[in-house]
Image (cartoon, rainbow, N blue to C red):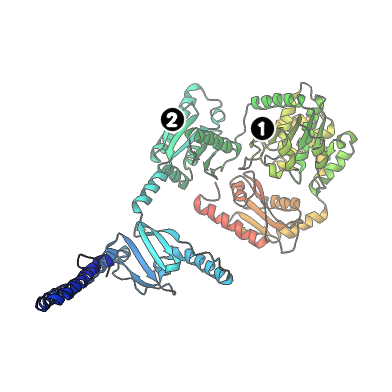
Amino acid sequence: MPKFLQRRWHGYHTVWAFMLLLVLIIIVSTYNWVLGVSSLFLAGTLCFSMLKAEISFRRKLVEYINGLSFRIKRVEGEAVSMLPLGIILYGEDRAIEWNNRYAGDIFSRKSLVGEPLPELLPDLMSSFQGTALVKRDLSRDSSPKEPSLKDQRVEIAVDERYYQVVLIPSERLLYLYDITELAVLRERYEEEKLALGILLMDNLDESAQGMDDQQRTSLIAKVTSEITEWAKQFDVYLRRLSSERYLMMLNHRSLQALEESRFVILDEVREMTANLKVPMTLSIGLAFGAESASELGALAQSSLDMALGRGGDQAAVKAGQRLSFYGGKSNAAEKRTRVRARVIAHALRDLMQESDRVLIMGHRTPDIDSVGAAIGLLKAAGMYNVEANIVMEGPNPSITRMIEEIRKDEELYKSFISTEQALQVMTEHTLLIVVDTHKASMTMEPRLVQYASRIVVVDHHRRGEEFINDAVLVYLEPYASSTCELVTELLQYIHEKVHLTPLEATMLLAGITVDTKQFALHTGSRTFEAAGFLRRIGADTILIQRMLKEDLQEYLSKAEIIKHARMVYDHIAVVVTASGMKIPQLLIAQTADTLLGMTNVLASFVISERPDGLIGISARSLGRMNVQVVMEKLGGGGHLSNAAAQLEGTGKEAEARLLEVLAEIEAKEGLFE
């Protein structure tokens, strides 16, 4: 019993009072024993009454406390059962030993006792596995400072309601909180986040070429009507900025719906204008996930630039760190105007004249197009008496004959320097020109890109996610057949009188010849104009044929590889070489080109181990299949009809990954246009 209840007015001080009374009675008895006896009797009666009252009080107090304790325990039990949160106790075997009423209501059962917890809440398995690992680690370490198991929180969904599960491993206890309103509010917030986009009729001038004003207006109205209907269908606000450009405002939910539809408007507009000489195509850039509207706008424009840099007729979506591409099934439309080439040529001329030196660098394992373009730009710098060099490193089988011809021209050959020499001569006033690639990681020496203060990019590949963003001048034209074609056009505008030696003209023409497969693929009118210009100033086609000749052993090796080809999806040839068979990248690419010439083959993939230990994949198509998208999913890139990738592992593993990607694309949008 609490002491404060015992210390009442008849507590211990009352005992002292009775003792004092007894002393007084004894004193009185010495004077009058009759009076003393009477006083003693009265005092005893009073003491007995008070003692009886105290005993009765204590008994009733105990009964009251016991009754109150029973009521509290009963209410506590009911409160635990009626609490708006689930409570579950489980044993070491993860079977449920007890649950409150609310936990049973969550799973629409009166009792959950005996049920295996992993079956009831499978989402908690990872948490249990983590707990088991921690326990195992604790058992290995018997130091006194053992860390305690931390509570873990997991969100689950049960019958369209959301719960947060708090797992307390030390007590083998689970709490389940209903967070449905919070989850719905959070989901709604995510769905209603703002996304911005820009839609562009990327080849309006080419499609409307030769039309009068009425026909052009009719074409624009027809396409605009289709775009407007599409925007209404997906709840997109569309604002016309010019005759060919639109601003798009939408929320995340609409953006997800657009991505699920694979931006069907791209195909609809192209098919609707298929009767034109050049069908109309659209490019779309969308951005989502930025903190401010201004940042969203900048990202949307960047996404549009990415879509245009990849050839147009596609949509690029930048959502946080994710960058996705949709469409891109058609070849880039050739631009008929030379205005851009002239502007770029004049800007490049000014940059060269302001520089103390020009360094020209291609990609790793350079090909004939890369070296030919570098030679053309070397000549351009020489026209203005600017010292220039081509950065080259190591032997390369694909350009062996080309280098042998270059060696015959001592002055030209002396212009080639190693990467170490380039790093030594580079200054803050040096101009670095990157040709035939726009990815710093693929250049001959990425450190040159890092150290250069001024960079120019000249490339014909479709733009990838990685890009040299700090370049002062970019000439990226995916419609071009080759980088040599772009450089040939620049040479015609960079100086009034272009004087190329026959060898220099031959190297440029060789680059065009190789990348167009003898003018069979990726050619436009500008390609033949560039080739005609080079031929007029002395390019030697016979020398090109000698440089491109195959020896007998290479031909036999190619035939041996082709022997293992098999067809998938009726029109795709796939080859995987035998394990341990190492083939140079050049031969892998040549084999893919050869397979493309077979009957009923629309695309080819050749997979083989290379001498450096990596697995090389070369992909080719006739234009009806976008092999660039396939290779990008495997970490590579390239053109719509010419792409490649490098993987680690084995040839069989690479084949399995390739087939998975093909199956994914076939299921979502189909492999062929």
In the image: residue 69, left or right of residue 198? left
Which amino acid, mark 1? Answer: Val
Q: Which residue is drawn at 78% across and 54% down?
A: 555
In the image: residue 291, left or right of residue 488? left
Q: In this view, does 654 lie above or below 505?
A: below
Give the mark nearer the N terminus: 1 vs 2: 2
Quadrant holding the N terminus: bottom left
Q: How crowded is mark 2: few (under 14 residues within 10 Å), some or many (20 or more)?
A: some
Q: How many labels does the image show?
A: 2
- Describe the element under mark 2 as helix, strand or loop: strand
Of 284 and 79, which appears nearest the observer? 79
* Res. 60 visible in picture: no
Q: What is the x, y in percent for residue 247?
A: 47, 32
Q: Residue at x 50, y 32 (%)?
A: 294
Asked whether the beta carbons under mark 1 and mark 2 sit within 8 Å of each other, the answer is no
**Residue to which mark 2 is pinned:** 239
Q: What is the x, y in percent for residue 302?
A: 56, 35
- Describe the element under mark 1 as helix, strand or loop: strand
Q: What is the x, y in percent for residue 334?
A: 62, 33
**Residue to which mark 1 is pinned:** 474
Measured Cα–Cα span from mark 1 to mark 2? 30 Å
Of 520 and 644, which appears nearest the observer? 644
Q: What is the x, y in percent for residue 117?
A: 41, 69
Q: Residue 624 carries which label?
A: none
Which amino acid, mark 2? Answer: Arg
In the image: residue 413, left or right of residue 249? right
- Image quadrant assignment for residue 305: top right
* Res. 649 visible in picture: yes
Of 650 and 135, which appears nearest the observer? 135
Of 543 and 105, which appears nearest the observer? 105
Q: In this view, does 402 lie above or below 222?
A: below
Q: Which residue is drawn at 79% across and 39% down?
A: 423
